[in-house]
Image (spheres, rainbow, N blue to C red):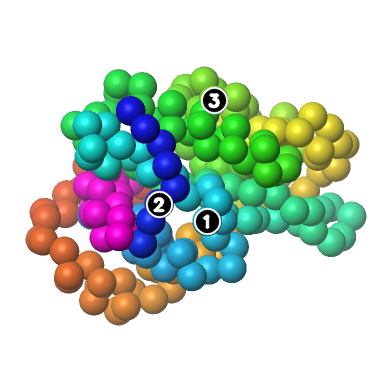
Amino acid sequence: MTIRLEQTKDFREIENLTREAFWNVYRPGCTEHYVLNQYRTNPDFIPELDFVMEEDNKIIGHVMFSKAEIMLDGGGSFPSWTFGPISIHPDYKRKGYGLKLLKYAIEAAKEMGIGLLQMEGNIEFYKHAGFDLASKLKIHYHAEPRDAEVPYFLAQELIPGYWGNREGTYCPPKGYFVADENPEAFEAYEATFPKKEKLRLPGQLGYEE
């Protein structure tokens, strides 16, 4: 298993990997591959933290990082960072590859001086990479009540004391909403991939039986 930086020649293969990894997971179909496609030219994109994982000379994983910010209660903003999508090929899921890739990327982020990460995900997985509820750091999620202990909104201080005793509200960077804001462009992009069946499944956002 090797981890390296993404190269231009990898772009389409990784977008296809991302599509396979997220298809029908959070919604019928997925948009994560389009987010990645558009993010590479976004000023918030961090190319030094754009990693590919290979096994037997095959790309099986990928993760990217983005600049972000927290709106402080007292006014102004505070620099922060996030990551995702993080993708592992379906044939390699639940074998520890995702955690290895994430830990590698987090160590690289620390070496760059990145002090604080927020993300949305399952704490039962991400706690193994050092994440905990963001509410414990008094970082609130924009889409939930301020006093809520949001189970899917997680954070980690990479530099001890970086966040200090501040309090504020986090909203994912605008680049993550590109498919919703440009549906026609997304559909045109999606049409360049082989057709796959979109399914409404339990566990997806907004699913009701």
In front: label 3 or label 2: 2
In this orientation, which residue lies closer to the viewer: 209 or 35?
35
Q: Residue at x 53, y 48 (%)?
A: 49
Q: Which residue is mark 2?
A: 6
Is the stretch drawn in magenta largely helix, strand or loop? helix
In front: label 1 or label 3: 1
Secondary element at image label 3? helix
How much space separates mark 1 and mark 3, taking CA atoms? 21 Å
Q: Position of residue 9 (x, y in %)?
A: 30, 60
Q: Residue at x 48, y 70 (%)?
A: 41
Which numbered disc flags the more N-terminal residue, 3 or 2? 2
Q: Is residue 173 left or right of residue 22?
A: right
Q: Is residue 103 left or right of residue 167?
A: left
Q: Is residue 198 above or below residue 188?
A: above
Which numbered disc flags the more N-terminal residue, 2 or 1? 2
Observer able to see residue 149: no
Q: Position of residue 66 (x, y in %)?
A: 57, 54
Residues at circles 2 and 1 in contact by the CB criterion of under 8 Å: yes
Q: Which residue is mark 3?
A: 129
Kind of residue sitting beneath label 3: Ala
Q: Which residue is mark 1?
A: 47
Q: Is residue 14 above or below residue 120?
A: below
Kind of residue sitting beneath label 2: Glu
Few, some or many residues within 10 Å of mark 1 (<14, 14–19, 20+): some
In this orientation, which residue lies closer to the viewer: 55 or 17?
55
Residue 22 painted magenta: yes
Q: Which residues are magenta?
A: 9-28
How much space separates mark 3 and mark 2, taking CA atoms? 22 Å
Residue 37 painted magenta: no
